[in-house]
Image (tube, coloured by chain):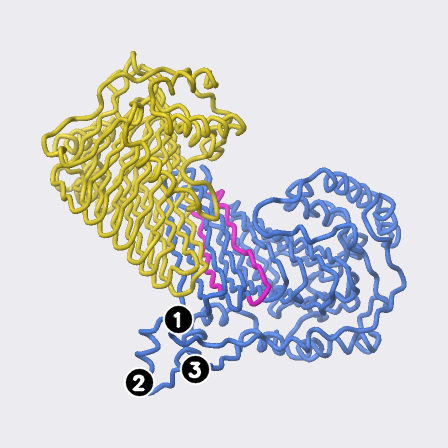
Chain colours: A yellow, B blue
Amino acid sequence: MYNKKLVDNLTTGQSKLLSSRRRESFDLFQDLAQGDYKRINLVDYQFPEYSPYNKEYLKEKKSQNELLIKKMTDNLNNEDEILNYLDQFKDKKVEKGNQGLDPKYLSMAEAFYNTGLFIKAPENVDLKLPVEIFYQLDQENPVLIDNNLIVAEENSSLTIVFDYRMQDQNLEAFHNGLTRVIVKDNAVLNIVKVQRFNNQSDNFDSNISLVSNQGELNWIPIELGSRNSVTNNENTLMNDGSRASISSVYFADGDRKLDLGFKMNHQGRHSSSEIESKGVLKDRAQKVFRGDLYFQKGASQANGSEKEEVLLLDKTVNSDSIPALFYEEDNVEGEHAVSAGQIDEQRLFYLMSRGLTKAEAKQLMVEAAFNPIFDKIPLNDLKGSVINDIKTRIRS
Amino acid sequence: MSDKTEVNDIDRSLHEEKNVEKHRYQSAKGLTPAVIKEISREKDEPDWMLKFRLKALEIYKNKEVPTWGADISDLDMDNIITYVRPDADLQSDWDQVPEEIKDTFDALGIPEAEKESLAGVGAQYDSEVVYHNLKEEMVEQGVVYMDMENAVKQHEDLVKQHFMKLITPNDHKFSALHGAVWSGGSFVYVPAGVDVNIPLQSYFRQNAPGSGQFEHTLIILEEGANAHFIEGCSAPKYSVNNLHAGAVELFINKGAKLRYSTIENWSRNMYNLNTKRALVEEDGVIEWVSGSFGSKVSMLYPMSILKGARARAEFTGVTFAAEGQYLDTGAQVIHDAPNTTSTVNSRSIAKDGGHAYYRGLLKATKNAPGAKASVSCESLMLDNESKSDTLPIMKLQTDDIDIGHEAKVGRISEEAVFYLMSRGISEEEAKAMIVRGFVEPIASELPLEYAVELNNLINLELEGTIG
């Protein structure tokens, strides 16, 4: 199914260099055994049958004229430029672990992507309005494999919102994505990713970034859906003063399983990073949090922190936390903190003494925990619908 | 460039004196059922123990060497002489212990320590216990403190009931190896309600080149009993890689309390792959105090299984990794009963290219509502050649728990140094104070009975190399 024939199909009509990239990835894909995520019992996963994705997913706006936006699947005339950017990711592999998700998933996305955008903010462009990308899955388009490349050139600033969603509650859909990001000197890039697939669907997502001198990258991943959701977010802070942050929110109920991996790889001096994860587990939900801070030799005066807070609403939940600090450099500051537990009884009691029902009080406390991160969603409609979504699910 | 505080290595010459080898019996190199049978025959063991050893050997052969953690590919198992019996019979009177063995122990300060406060000394020279003594009043109260070999014969039922039940040969390759070739170690039994108010101390030491040490420690505390056991290790340095794969099994019954203190100070060519576990029943308490200073490679993760309601575990540990050392240590706590509590406090220091790795596990099962746990790991890197990693894994399977975790890695804060200097303290002394302060919470928990060795380890010689 995911064979050479399919690659041949996909490369028809695609530009030459990108096609050969696909083939290289396919060669790698072929030789690899399926990667397992044992902590959420995801073993020997079978990729569902391939299907093209034919819906429009970019919301065009006038202001975007300043940007360069291309579909990776098209026959592009600027593919040299794209390849050039992609090559920068070579040799940036962190000593420990994979780049992105398991290599099988990553090479699958690079060989068989059916969508994807190349977005570039040229030098000195400061874009006020966010770029909106809607990947919506339905009966006709149940498989999404997106390969995105986002580049913020020097002194540019840009916000991109990815909304992964679906209406159909019974459809078994599949997403395996890859988003590569380059943030050049002094650029600021914010990326919001909201994932709201139904509980029949599986979600896999790799996010890999390179941040240069004084560049700043802020991720806001919001994970609300899927039966299995495995995501990885790896950032390399290459130079002086590179900055990256991850503000993650998740809500898992029913039998949902989440495996969230966050990595900050400090190479540059004075580089700084922050990982913040807040989540709620309900019913029989399972979650794995992996947060890695690497301080490579030479990253002097770098600082990094990771903080995880998880609220457990039921006896039957399963919560794994694996925060790791790796130091090869002494002149750095790094710390992590984890707290896990039930909703504070006293606060709950106080709210109830003010006339709120237990469900309302719980909901209010969860909202209070999440709101600082939700405030970073630049689109009010999206923010509103995300908050509503959580409200109804907490009460049920 | 900022100045660095120089923390000197401990003077090891005292511990690395080695005696001329003198043995009555040395088993053939390598592991075969014949070797195991010979060990068992030499020890005059009951048949069930021989069967157990042979079964463990079978498991050992089929188990893979773990791929995570330390690189132990240098370890050539076929070249480790598994059993070395020293040229001395078991003694209970110090005067009868052979002179040269005594010299080594004297250098380590054992007899003096005993006179001061120790209830008994079970000193292990190579694989056999050569010296054993327990104050009479303890014997009268029914306390048993003897070498493992004799315990197998004299307290067969108790041993059979507990031996390798907590750590089984199936756990990992080195526990299987231990099951097959274990030799020496201590057996402690404290009857219900008895409070052993003086610490029990045993000293482990390796002397013969290429000899592995596989001592087994089994401690059983009956209901309401109270004891403090001290284990210390020091081995002379040899060119052949040495292996230590001991096992410590602690059974703490209802309301009993055990403090288990260890200073691991193996020489810098030792592979220390030790396994330690405690099973704690209702209202029982286990307190681990653990110092890891020596060895080339250590992989040591004492586990507390809180099986009874309100059981409690405390772990206090300090790891000091210097040049050429990879010390991979940490605490494991399993909360498996309601309202159990645990506290883990770990400090590590890395210098001169040493690699300190904290790897811990905290698990709360469905049976543990009301569990409370806190884990705190701090690391200090004294230079830029060293490595320090922290990996505390948490696994929560229920909601009604209160878990807190914190970890920090850093170097000596320049602001703190500056502040102290503004108070009239020299830079050198300021830095020394900060390092001492860093280890202090752990150091104060370590047993004082270790007079000589402990002072060497805790009194880190702090000297400035400023300028």
In the foreground, A356 or A76: A76
Residue at mark 2 to residue at mark 3: CA–CA distance: 19 Å
Q: In the picture provided, is B276 more to the left or to the right than A229?
A: right
Return the chain for callout 1: B
The earlier-in-sequence mark between 2 and 1 is 1
**Residue B412 - label:** 1
Return the chain for callout 3: B
Q: Residue at x 34, y 73 (%)?
A: B414
Percent of width and height locating residue B444: 49, 72
Both on one chain, marks 1 and 3? yes
Residue at mark 2 to residue at mark 1: CA–CA distance: 17 Å
Q: Secondary structure at mark 2?
A: loop
Residue type marked 1: Ile
In the foreground, A218 or B103: A218
Residue type marked 2: Arg
Q: Which residue is mark 2?
A: B423
Is residue B228 shown above or below A42? below
Q: Which residue is mark 3?
A: B466
Q: Secondary structure at mark 3?
A: loop
